[in-house]
Image (spheres, coloured by chain):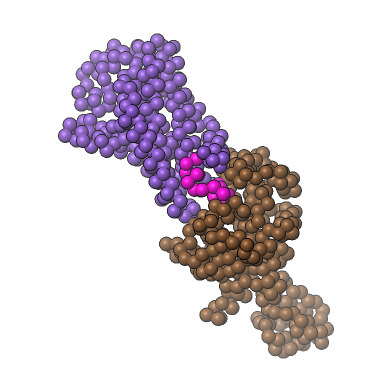
Amino acid sequence: MNDGLLALVGFHLRERRRSPLAWGLPLGAMSAFIVAIYPSVQGALTKVVAQYPEGLKQAFGIGELSNAEQYLHGEMLSLIVPLAVGYLAARAVAADLSGAAESGRLEVLLSAPVTRRSICLGAFLAAAVEIAAVLLLTLLLSLIGSALAGAGLDLGDAVAGFAAVWPLALVGGGLAIVVSGFSLKTSVVTGVVAGFLVAMYVVDLMGKLDESLSGIRYASVFRYYGNAIEDGIEPFGFLGLLALAAVLALIGAVFFERRDLAV
Amino acid sequence: MSAAAIEAERLSKVYPGGHGIAELTMTVAAGEVFGFLGPNGAGKTTTIRTLLDLIHPTGGSARLLGLDSRRDSLAIRGRVGNLPGDFGFGRDTTGREALALLARIRGARTERAGELAERFRADLDRPLGELSRGNRQKVGLILAAFHRPELLILDEPTGGLDPMMQEEFLTLVGEERGRGATVFLSSHELDEVERICDRVGIVRDGALVAVERVPELLGRARRKVSVRLADHGGLEDLRRIPGVSDLTSADGAVSFRFAGDLDPVVKALAVHRVADLEVARPTLEEVFLGYYQGGEERS
């Protein structure tokens, strides 16, 4: 990694140093609360869930709810955390590309000897670190909530569950670079990525709800994200999403190199 | 090495909306201070961005410091300093943070930035979002010049600067020229252009309509002359002088517009008793008007 790229990553991380707290604390507090109340609602939930239609349980990842991991997946890791962190990845990338174009920074940076590819790569790497920090904080707070309430959240399972979100969120970051190749408006970049993530979730959900549509799940990134807190990290899905994120970032960098830098 | 710092050959940028620059051809010599003038929307910023490969030309080519503006863009940017028209770097970023990043990317030392900050009384430690436009502009100037570039490109550099800082800026440009750097600046300030530029290019609707040395530029401008003649005569003498127009007279007060060498006017007035004489400096708009009207007449 060259010095210019390192400098860009360091600059981006310093500039967004409050983000892990701003996003990790609320997500972590919510996760900790979910885990902490699990022991007290466990019995009632089991009875309620038993009455849910099978398709609905499958669609929303609601299992037997016989442990805190299942409850945390159903309440947080199946939708809220991936969507929130995927959106954050798009925001982080957009801040360094479209946001930098809007503030005038991009013009100053690109008047210096740095390639557009380095700027895209710097934005992507900084987003990867930022997301990892948010997920780590969320994981830590969840474990603290479990320890305080005696919920018995397994460390290894919890690590797997939150780690699996990372490549999925990076797909959002990679897509943000692609969109930045066409639009330097932050609202457009984050809007497209948020819409993409929701659409992916809906596609996966439809495949789960209707057996005849199960094939469409292969087109959704949520199919490869899976349910790592219960099933463990699936290497193919994890590495596949990571590869997709990297490919999107590279394709985005090519588009970004070709575009004019005027907002 | 080429003697020209900037060479543009039929450089064009056509936007889908229709504006941009059209077949712009010009040469800026190494070591020259070149003013690039034109009203808003004439194509000054588009030209600068195209030269720096921030936007890609739709036709023609440009060479900066002897290198192709597209193929060798990275190498060029290592030797150039650029102050964009509306400088910004992010609301929460301080000048020092921006400087540290650019110094690392350029592999340059920051000592000169400290000297410039002292001269321009720039605050490098406050977030840029808390600074006034003028104070932000000072930081932008420092970021453009701290690494002693061979070519300085400055888009409206004195916007927001107070008169004292404008004076300091003119001194700085003189020093840059003194060490052999080329300065390419767009401006709206005729005073500024007159004092520091060797030559001036005038751009209109994306086309370069003239490149002149500054005295020739001012000579072409239609100045407003007001004279009070005690003997109430001289009108016909003045009317016959080439370049005199819009001549009006009332109670011995004569006013007219004049383009060219003032000598025949002074000589025509010298045979009368002149009670008062005022020659107003042309505004930049009047300078443009001289060229634009000339262009319309020619076309």
Residue lying at the far front of the rendered structure: B1
Q: Nearer the viewer, residue B34 or A144?
A: B34
**Residue B229 drawn at (x, y percent):** 79, 82
Q: At 68% across and 78% down in the image, what residue appears?
A: B259
Magenta span includes A113 = yes
Residue A242, position as x, y percentages in the image: 38, 34
The part of the image, by quadrant, that contains residue B258 is bottom right
**Residue at the image point whose x is 61% and y is 54% from the top:** B80
At horizontal 45% and vertical 44% (from top left) the residue drawn is A186
- Camera sees residue B102: no
Residue A189, position in %: x, y?
41, 44
Chain A in the picture: what colour?
purple
User: In the visual, does A214 lie left or right of B3?
Assistant: left
Residue occupying the point 21% across, 35% down: A215
Residue range highlighted in magenta: A105-122
Q: Nearer the viewer, residue B150 or B288?
A: B150
Image position of B132 with respect to A20: above or below? below
Q: What color is chain B drawn in?
A: brown
Asked which quadrant contains residue B45, the reply is: bottom right
Is any atom of residue A57 visible in this view? yes
